[in-house]
Amino acid sequence: MASPGGTSSGSSMFHSSGSSEDLQAAMDEKKRKRMISNRESARRSRLRKQKHLDDLMALANQLRKENSRVLAVLNLTTRHCAAAQAENSVLKAQMMELSSRLESLNEMLDIFNVNSSSSSSFFMGDGLHAIDNSISPLIQSYTTQPIMAAAEHMFHH
């Protein structure tokens, strides 16, 4: 006696095994799509990493060039600073020498003014002339001496 459930159970078995194969095929298809998607995602990730690496390399090259330029400017500025310091030292030495000369000349003028009350002297347009021959050559020789402070004498490295 065949029961209606027996036939349906046989057909359900067939249907369930077909459904299992369909389910397996659908899972295989999902797995295949996921693998393709993962591969594509990994490819995009590698491309992003490569682009980032290329950008960093370009930035490193740009910074090296900028560093070289800044270093060249620094070296030039350092040389200019050293030259200005050397010139400043020469000018300070010249100022000290001239101050010393001025002080000596003022002392001589003081001596001359004290002596001028006892001797005859007069001023002319071209400078001081003293009738007292003992002072006049001293003043003239002192005023014609060159200034000795110069860069070539100050810095011997």
Image (cartoon, rainbow, N blue to C red):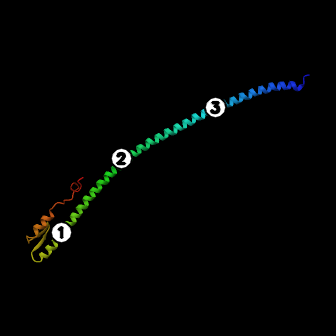
Closer to the chain start, of discs 2 and 3, is: 3
Dot in front, 1 or 3:
3
Q: Secondary structure at mark 2?
A: helix
Number of numbered discs overlaid on the protein picture: 3
Closer to the chain start, of discs 2 and 1, is: 2
Q: Viewed as shown, does residue 117 lie left or right of 65?
A: left
Q: Residue furthest front?
A: 1
What x and y, as percent, mark residue 92? 26, 61
Position of 20 relative to 48 (above/below): above
Q: Which residue is mark 1?
A: 104
Amino acid tagged 1: Ser
Q: Which residue is mark 2?
A: 72
Position of 48 relative to 7 (above/below): below
Q: Which residue is mark 3?
A: 35
> Residue at left 68%, top 29%?
29
> Residue at left 72%, top 28%?
24
Determine the CA span between mark 1 and mark 3. Answer: 101 Å
What x and y, as percent, mark residue 67? 40, 46
Q: Viewed as shown, does residue 106 lie left or right of 26?
A: left
Q: Quadrant of residue 5?
A: top right
Is there a contact, CB below 8 Å, between mark 2 and mark 3? no
